[in-house]
Amino acid sequence: QVQLVESGGGLVQPGGSLRLSCAASGSIFSINAMGWYRQAPGKQRELVAAITSGGSTNYVDSVKGRFTISRDNAKNTVYLQMNSLKPEDTAVYYCNVEGYRSRSSRFSSWGQGTQVSVSS
């Protein structure tokens, strides 16, 4: 089993910043992609940002220039630095980690979700 623990959500005013963290633990042989998704009320879950094992990143257009994804491979942790937050960023944010438990056993795990609310 691979468990993900998220932290860092909260309530912030427009223009403010938050940093989300997601730590993976358990039976992990290697980690490939790590990503952050979000789901707003009444909307589908969308990919916000992702980072590969080699450090390549991609972002949804609406957060480019404001959000930064990074990872600490030694800690099996992925971060999402969110700056210049807007009310439309309000959502539950989920991390996703994909990798291998062994050389032949893949996994894809989700965090429990953390609420990010942007409001004055």
Image (cartoon, rainbow, N blue to C red):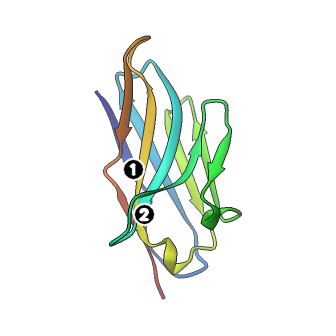
Q: Secondary structure at mark 1?
A: strand
- For residue 84, the mark is none
- Where is residue 97 drawn, in percent x and y? 44, 37
Q: Is residue 39 above or below residue 52?
A: below
Q: Which residue is mark 2?
A: 9
Contact (Cβ within 8 Å) of mark 1 with mark 2: yes
Q: Is residue 74 left or right of residue 119?
A: right
Q: Is residue 87 left or right of residue 26?
A: right
- Where is residue 41 drawn, in percent x and y? 34, 72
Hey, which quadrant is residue 51 in on the image?
A: top right
Residue lying at the far top of the rendered structure? 103
* Mark 1 residue crowding within 10 angstroms, few (<14) / some (14–19) / many (20+): many
* Mark 2 residue crowding within 10 angstroms, few (<14) / some (14–19) / many (20+): some
Q: Nearer the viewer, residue 4 or 105?
A: 105
- For residue 6, the mark is 1
Q: Is residue 102 above or below residue 92?
A: above
Q: Is residue 90 above or below residue 52?
A: below
Q: Who's the residue at 58% across and 69% down the image?
A: 17
Q: Secondary structure at mark 2?
A: loop
Q: Is residue 117 above or below residue 48?
A: below
